[in-house]
Image (spheres, rainbow, N blue to C red):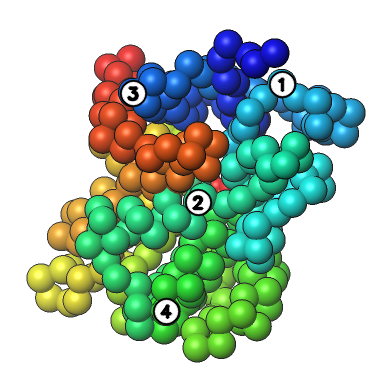
Amino acid sequence: MKAPFQLYGIFGYPLGHTLSPAMQEAAFEAAGIKAYYLVLEFDSPHFHKLMARASDKLLLDGFNITVPYKRVIQKYIRRISPEAKIIGAVNTVYRSDGQWAGTNTDVYGFLTSLVKDGKFNPKKKTALILGSGGSARAVVYGLAKSGARQIRIAARRPSRARKIVSDFKKVFRKTEFNVFSLNRNDLKKGLTNADLVVNTTSVGLRPGDKSLIPVSMIPSAGRAKRILFFDLVYHWPQGTAFLKNARRKGQPALGGLGMLLHQGAKAFERWTGKPAPVSVMKKVLEESLKKRKAK
Ligand SMILES: NC(=O)c1ccc[n+]([C@@H]2O[C@H](COP(=O)([O-])OP(=O)(O)OC[C@H]3O[C@@H](n4cnc5c(N)ncnc54)[C@H](OP(=O)(O)O)[C@@H]3O)[C@@H](O)[C@H]2O)c1
């Protein structure tokens, strides 16, 4: 018997901040699909227990995966897209011939927002990436795939950044990769002649978080060249300290809401086979973020 509705959801921990349910449920409604999108907040022992025992039996039609399970989910999934395999992270899971299949829509979300919202073409450009976690891997992959000339990764644990470089340099032979620490001298070198700086760390998630790049290190847009500052964190309507510092120097600054929108739109299309109602999804995200400010 066919279920009277479809069921989707997001696994992660913690999930208090997620805007995905509001965005996806508005999309289902606009597309005339009867579906629900659940918040599946499981801590690590419960997540692994559920996946190990029941991943094939989950009554879900598809789901998203967020921090901290984007890497570990791979061991419970039979089919993983080549792109997600290279990146080493899955954020969208769907059914294919009765089995779970995993893909990564963060790359698409990042690149679409970079080009559409940031008016930035990565081809032959130099980028400084802060962080070496799951989203850093997606961002570095997306930029290299788009023909970036040089990608510099500055991380608290340079060994993780070196692992990204060793995984990707075999695939992207035309891109030059460098690894830096987050100390002042290294950041200065990383910023030299950069066209783009992306914060992929979770710094900025908590209120009062300071930026990893102090305002004094950012060149003024009037005197030096323009640098686009892109922060994957989207949780504050007024932006993070990273973005505020950039704006103070007249540099363009872009938050992560557009990336969230486009990765979600791609996931919706993967699950339903229908075009995503992007403008409806965008409106809901913007309104949800405004409400957060009002609290
Ligand atoms: N806009 C979107 O659609 C979107 C999509 C994906 C992710 N995100 C956001 O991106 C951020 C990272 O997500 P993720 O999946 O990459 O998480 P992750 O895999 O846990 O990686 C987090 C990274 O942040 C670094 N970090 C954390 N605290 C730090 C500090 N105080 N100083 C320096 N580095 C620090 C970690 O360094 P260590 O390795 O040393 O711990 C790691 O490199 C989150 O805020 C997430 O919400 C947004």
- Where residue 59 is drawn, which disc sits there? 1
Q: CA distance from mark 4 to mark 2?
A: 18 Å
Q: Is residue 43 left or right of residue 251?
A: right
Question: Where is mark 2, residue-wise?
Answer: 106
| Quadrant occupied by the C terminus | top left
Vertical order, 138 against 29 (above or below): below
Q: Position of residue 161 (x, y in %)?
A: 63, 69
- Residue 147: mark in rendering: 4
Dot 1: element:
loop
- Residue contact at pointers 4 and 1, CB within 8 angstroms: no
Q: Which disc is residue 22 wearing?
A: none
Task: Name which residue lies at 67% across and 25% down.
Answer: 60
Circle 3 residues within 10 Å: few <14, some 14–19, many ≥20: few
- Give the distance between the C-alpha atoms of the residues marked 1 and 2, in whole angstroms: 25 Å
Q: CA distance from mark 2 to mark 3?
A: 23 Å
**Tag 4: amino acid:** Gly
Of marks 4 and 3, the one in the foreground: 3
Task: Assess disc 2: are there few (<14), some (14-19) or many (≥20) residues with their C-alpha within 10 Å of its C-alpha.
Answer: many
Q: Amino acid at mark 1?
A: Leu
